[in-house]
Every structure is written in C-alpha cells, then in structure tokens.
Amino acid sequence: MLKAVLVDDEKNALEILEWQLQTYCPHVHIAELCTTADEGIAAIHRHAPHLVFLDIEMPHKNGFELLRSFPDPPFAVLFTTAYDQFAVKAFKFAALDYLLKPIAAEELVTAVQRYEKQQPSPFKDQLELLLQHYSHPALAPSKLPFATQDGITFVKPKNIARCESSSNYTTLFFTDKSKLIVSKTLKEVEELLQPHGFLRVHHSHLLNVQQVSRYVKAEGGLLK
C-alpha cells in the first residue's frame, strides 16, 4: 500500500484527484488532503508519505517553497499543474513526472505505475535542477538527467560527442568512447541539448559541434 498526501489550493481539484486515485489506483492510501503549502508541510511530517501530489502555483507559498522545507526529501513527488510551457520544460529538463490539469485517468495510472517500478532516483539533484531551470530558464545547466532502465543518470553535455536515434530510445556516445542508452526520443534529447551547442545533422543523428574539427564538401558533406 502506497501512502500519499495531496496538496492543491483548489478544493475541487483535490476532490477530483482523490476520486481518481480511489477509483483507478485503489492501492494508494490517501493520508490527507491539503489546500495550502503549510498544511502540506505539516501533513508530510505527520504521515511520512511515499508520494506527494503537489500543485505548483498556490497563493502565499507555492509548491517549490514547500519542497525547500525538505532539503533531502524522503518521498517522491508527482507535480500537478495547469498548462505552463515554462513549467513543463523545467520538468522535462529535470526528468521529473508531472500531470497536466485536467488530469487524465490513464496518465495518472501510468505515473503511479512508473513510480512503483522505478529504482531509487537522485530526487534531490533532480529537484535542484528543476528549481534552477524554472527560475532561470535561459541558463544551460552543466549536468542533465537522463532516464535509463536502471534509473536516472546525470551527464555533462560537454562529454557527449554525438547522439543516435533508436526508435523510442536514443544512444549517447561519449568522448571517452563509452555509451548510454536513454529512454528518450532523439527529438526530446535535442530539446535538452540544443542550448549546449548540439546540431541535428540527420534525421537520426545529433552532433556536438564542439567535437567537429573539419567539414568536407564531398558526397553531400562530411563532418569530421
């Protein structure tokens, strides 16, 4: 049985999410519903939940301020938010789960199942990256998280030589000749790496231009 705390300033949204969890995820025990960040902080201390469903935009104190009360959170977070392109991009950068309102039942079930299957992940590092990108979206972080079959791996973009598409996965090839298969399409990887000087040179290849020393004008062009 998973224990959860729900935090959202909209009472109607809380009640809908409560009903959805009871209906589609009956193994999730809802310990408490909270309408403010302070209530959420108290409830988390009181119940020690496995999961916190957390709205970002709340008056007085938002979801990020709640999380700052837990420097090394012992729980996982499923963010709930109305559509906000900057917030969504920040979640993707940090490889964190989020649910867009109105929350679709199948997406809720998938998110809960993903939490149950995943290996322990470096949530503290992901949270720091999320806060950094949400506050300063123009800054390119020095490390990026990539989901793999074993969990989350943090990678320095400057150490990636190139990326190659493999259906719904992407293989990252590093300058030290090692490689890593990540659970993202090449398009998703491109969104993360574009600020770091990566260029789509083919429909299935992404290249770090810092690793290019020559361009040969032959047979359509060749990069070395």
Image: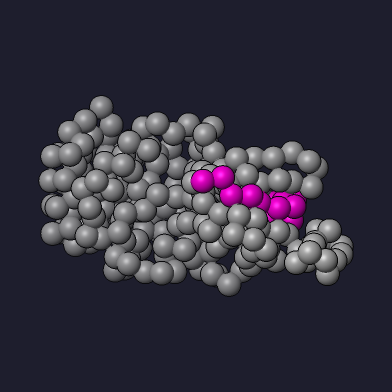
Q: Is residue 132 visible?
A: no
Residue 164 is covered by the magenta coloring: yes
Q: Is residue 134 visible?
A: yes
> Start and end of the magenta stretch?
156-167
Residue at horizontal 35 percent and vertical 48 percent from the top:
78
On the rendered image, what quadrant is the C terminus found in? Answer: bottom right
Residue at horizontal 63 percent and vertical 67 percent from the top:
195
Q: Is residue 123 left or right of residue 164?
A: left
Q: Give coordinates of residue 222: x percent, y percent.
A: 80, 62
Q: Is residue 97 left or right of residue 100?
A: right
Residue at horizontal 41 percent and vertical 59 percent from the top:
64
Q: Is residue 80 placed above or below 84 in the rendered structure? A: above
On the rendered image, what quadrant is the N terminus found in? Answer: top left
Outermost residue on the front side: it is 219
Outermost residue on the bottom side: it is 138
Residue 20 is covered by the magenta coloring: no
Q: Nearer the viewer, residue 17 or 189?
A: 189
